Image: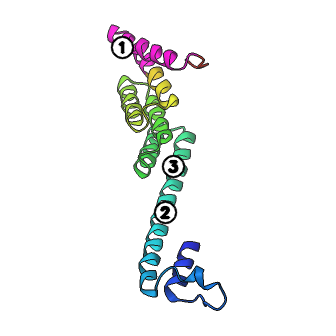
Amino acid sequence: FWIIAGATVVTAGLVDPRTRPAAILQFASPVARRPVAVALAVVAVVASVAAVRSLAADRLIRDAVESADVERSIRAAERAVDLDPNDIRLRIVLARSYERRATVDGLDAAIDEVDDARSISSLDPTVLREQARLASLRASITGSDADRERAIGLWEDRVEAAPNCAFC
């Protein structure tokens, strides 16, 4: 609001040079003020849209966490990720929602989601722990040597990167 109000004041020339020191108001001619005001208004609109999308994503993710219905939880989390695709915490909640399906396919979807979160923030400790946890869960379900080796490798990487990690 204040950015738009300031832009309006600058554009309309509502500031009286007699009430303020002239040096402050002489920064630009009236013609140069208009593009500045337009730029400020555009920034304000973009910031407002981003804030509204983020707020909507937060509400959807809350619904996903609180929902007892697995598919409803997944739908809400997917919509939240669509609104704010670069938020890794939303992706982790979506992965946990997929995991609640209690199937190998659901677990694979959760692993894919955590891999997407890792592509956004490759060194985030929460994402790395979640990746190792899901790999361990998959290894315990499938019992395959490849899955066990992958899980052990991920946990070894976590311990090496953070030797004092209480969760590793």
Which residue is at 51% across, 60% downward? 52
Quick check: is 161 in the magenta stretch? Answer: yes
Task: Check disc 1 and give the amino acid type.
Answer: Asp
Between residue 97 and residue 158, name the one nearer to us.
Answer: 158
Find residue 155 and report its horizontal and vertical position in percent.
47, 15
Find residue 83 and report its horizontal and vertical position in percent.
43, 52
Find residue 64 and report its horizontal and vertical position in percent.
51, 42
Whether residue 159 is situated above or below residue 103 in the rendered picture = above
How far apart are labels 3 and 2 at the CA level? Answer: 20 Å
Label 3: few (<14), some (14–19) or many (≥20) C-alpha neighbours in 10 Å: many
The outermost residue toward the front is 23
Label 1: few (<14), some (14–19) or many (≥20) C-alpha neighbours in 10 Å: some
Instruction: Name the quarter where the C terminus is drawn.
Output: top right
Q: Which mark is residue 60?
A: 3
Between residue 112 and residue 71, name the one nearer to us.
Answer: 112
Q: Which residue is mark 1?
A: 147
Q: Can residue 1 be seen in this snapshot?
A: no
Q: Which residue is mark 2?
A: 47
Label 2: few (<14), some (14–19) or many (≥20) C-alpha neighbours in 10 Å: few
Comes first in the chain, label 3 or label 1: 3
Q: Which segment is the magenta one?
A: 135-163
Comes first in the chain, label 3 or label 2: 2
Which residue is at 53% across, 76% downward? 4
How far apart are labels 1 and 2 at the CA level? Answer: 44 Å
Q: Nearer the viewer, mark 3 or mark 1?
A: 1
Comes first in the chain, label 1 or label 2: 2
- Secondary structure, mark 1, is helix
Whether residue 128 is situated above or below residue 93 in the rendered picture = above
